[in-house]
Image: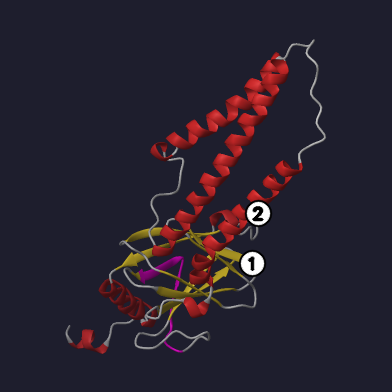
Amino acid sequence: MKKFWALFFFFWPTVAIIVCAIAPSRGWWFPGAPMSRTGIQIDGLFYLILIIVTITFVGTQYVLGYALWRGATKDPREKAFFSHGSHKLEIIWTIVPSFILVFISLSQLDVLAEIRVISKFPEKSTKVAEVKARQFEWRIRYPKPGTELTTEENPGDLYFVNELHVPTGKPVIVNLRTQDVQHAFFSPQLRVKQDAVPGLVIPIWFDVLEVGTYDLVCAELCGWGHYKMKARIVAQSQSSVDKYLTQLTADQNADGTKSEAAKSGE
């Protein structure tokens, strides 16, 4: 039974290494490659921490397994070794983790500042829409074509639900707010995540590298319908976004009757 526990602690770190090695090819990893510039940086930080944690976990488990194996295979007649401890060893395993934590903290400062600090946002970023979370949907407000987005609603603003259209290849800003409880704006493929806090308007920025449709979900438990609070981010060329907004303007202003021009042409 003693040898079993030694083998147990050898077995699981080995399984962890094998699973991590085959995970990407089997789709057990990220939901695809990052589709934003900040997403690439975030993945880099993730892999940095993953490597450090993996080495630490595997190393400590193998050392523990080795210690148990030595105890299990030791001659019971052999005299036991007793130690009062080692001050040098205690200093080492205190200082080394401290340096590792400081290294991780310093490594992520630039990325965190670029994502969270407004003064660090890209200079040529464009405010495209306000996203208002509410149980259990995302309400999108675009500024009237030809005007800039403000924190207050204005005549001519355009509205839609659960579908955000943004241009690709350029940084865009979305004003995030909530109408009721706390929610979280999360797009896994873009690696964008930000809480929507009651009473606050929080600007977030991202840039989409490729044309496509990306998931937008709520990552904060917000009530019984949290599971269905899903939307999509549609990344298009600027001309396609302009065309979409033109059509949205026409749909929003339609009164159910034909225009005078259409009537005269009949």
Instruction: Name the residue tied to disc 1.
Output: 182
Q: Main secondary structure of the magenta part?
A: strand
Magenta stretch: includes residue 162: yes
Instruction: Name the residue tied to disc 2.
Output: 98
Residue located 47% across and 88% down the image: 154
Residue 152 visible here: yes
Residue located 28% across and 70% down the image: 237
Q: How many marks?
A: 2
Q: Residue 139: horizontal and vertical position, in percent?
A: 50, 71
- 167, 247: nearer the viewer: 167
Q: CA distance from mark 2 to mark 1?
A: 34 Å
- 50, 144: nearer the viewer: 50
Badge 2 marks a residue whose secondary structure is: helix
| Residue stretch in magenta | 155-166
Numbered label attached to residue 194 = none
User: Looking at the image, is 26 positioned above or below residue 152?
Assistant: above
Q: Residue 223: horizontal and vertical position, in percent?
A: 65, 59
User: Looking at the image, is 12 positioned above or below residue 153?
Assistant: above
User: Label 1 is placed on what type of residue?
Assistant: Gln
Residue 190 visible here: no
Left or right: 199, with 55 as reference point: right
Residue located 57% across and 31% down the image: 13
Quadrant of the image occupied by residue 210:
bottom left
User: Label 2 is placed on what type of residue?
Assistant: Ser
Left or right: 73, with 218 as reference point: right
Magenta stretch: includes residue 132: no
